[in-house]
Image (spheres, grey):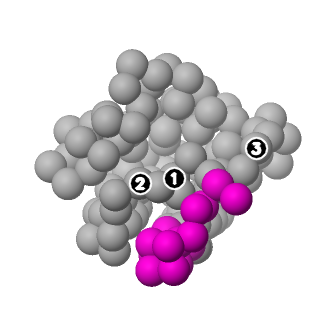
Amino acid sequence: MNKEILELADIRLLVDSFYDKVREDDRLASVFNEKIGDQWPKHLERMYRFWQTILLEEHTYHGSPFAPHAGLPVNRAHFDRWLYLFYQTVDENFTGELAREAKWRAGKMAQMFLYKIEYHKNNNVDPHH
């Protein structure tokens, strides 16, 4: 039975379940594993804080979410797959207002990241400046 997203333990379940899928996915695993390498625990901790800040309004995340993604070799198909897996993970585990908000925010974030990555590629702009 699905539950609502109410506390950090729920965020951890969401993040861990989602990235378990990403790490096994034919399209996404190589991109993530190449970028993150052996830093998965650090990455997951950062994702807990990010979603905790967004969904629970407990401000534990600091930084710019886009910067680490700026130079990734990805396109719309990668973002579509990322979003599909994220929605699937939310729907498998959660229900309620914050579950819907998590999906909405993930969709907006994917849209913005894709736009910015394509802009930097198409205009030969260094995304770190």
Q: Is residue 115 visible?
A: no
Which residue occupies the foreground of this view, 87 or 111? Answer: 111
Judging from the image, what secondary structure is the residue with disc 1 in? Answer: helix
Residue type for callout 2: Leu
Crowd band around label 3 with a 10 angstrom C-alpha radius: few (<14), some (14–19), many (20+) = few
In the image, the segment drawn in magenta is: 116-129
Which residue occupies the foreground of this view, 61 or 76? Answer: 76
Is 128 inside the magenta-drawn segment?
A: yes
Count up the numbered dots. 3
Name the residue at the left extreme: 26
Would residue 122 be found to the left or right of residue 106 on screen?
A: left
Crowd band around label 2 with a 10 angstrom C-alpha radius: few (<14), some (14–19), many (20+) = few
Which residue has dot 1 on it? 69
Residue type for callout 1: His
User: Mark 2 and mark 3: span between their CA atoms?
Assistant: 18 Å
Q: Position of residue 111 (x, y in %)?
A: 51, 75
Which residue occupies the foreground of this view, 17 or 77? Answer: 77
Which residue has dot 2 on it? 72
Q: Position of residue 61 (x, y in %)?
A: 76, 39
- The dot on residue 63 is 3
